[in-house]
Image (cartoon, helix red, strand yellow):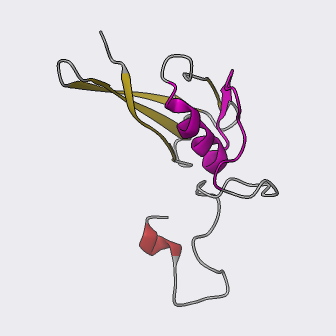
Amino acid sequence: MNFHFLTTLCASHFPENKGAEFVVMYQLHNMYQNVRIRIITQLPENELSLPSITSLWPSANWMERQEYDFFGINYEGHPDLRRILNMDEMNYFPMRKEYRLEDAGRDDKDDKFFGR
């Protein structure tokens, strides 16, 4: 099908979707015919693992590292899966919605205004 360019790889966390809390989206582009497709997969929070696609699309290398860094998704077979933007000492994944957006001591900010 000649989808030779990986445009986007990103993840999202939907804690209310029990059994499919995480979503990973791949967007591929066939530049010859100017056609794009989007592939979406869902993962339960206790099985955050996908095969790496770096052998097919080398640009996935940093994208997979980013999603590991922010969401904790393990890409099996990745050549160098480690944090890329956050400190190595972090023992959590900051883009998961299990953390409050604001300081709990503040009463002028409320997560419900941010869709939580």
Front one among 96 and 27? 27
Q: Quadrant of residue 37?
A: top left
In the depicted structure, whether residue 81 falls above or below residue 33: below
In this view, the residue farthest toward the left is 33
Q: Which image quarter holds the N terminus?
A: top left
In the depicted structure, whether residue 40 falls above or below residue 97: above
Give the percent coordinates (x, y) of residue 21: 56, 41
Front one among 31 and 18? 31
Q: Residue at x 31, y 12 (%)?
A: 2
Q: Residue at x 64, y 37 (%)?
A: 73
Residue 14 seen from this side: yes
In the depicted structure, whether residue 79 falls above or below residue 70: above
How many callouts does the rendering have?
0
Q: Quadrant of residue 115?
A: bottom left
Q: Which residues are magenta?
A: 58-85
Q: Residue at x 67, y 43 (%)?
A: 72
Q: Residue at x 49, y 35 (%)?
A: 24
35 drawn magenta: no
Q: Quadrant of residue 81?
A: top right
Give the percent coordinates (x, y) of residue 92: 74, 55
78 left or right, relative to 1: right
Give the percent coordinates (x, y) of residue 79: 69, 26
49 left or right, relative to 31: right
Give the percent coordinates (x, y) of residue 15: 57, 49
61 left or right, relative to 5: right
Residue 18 seen from this side: no
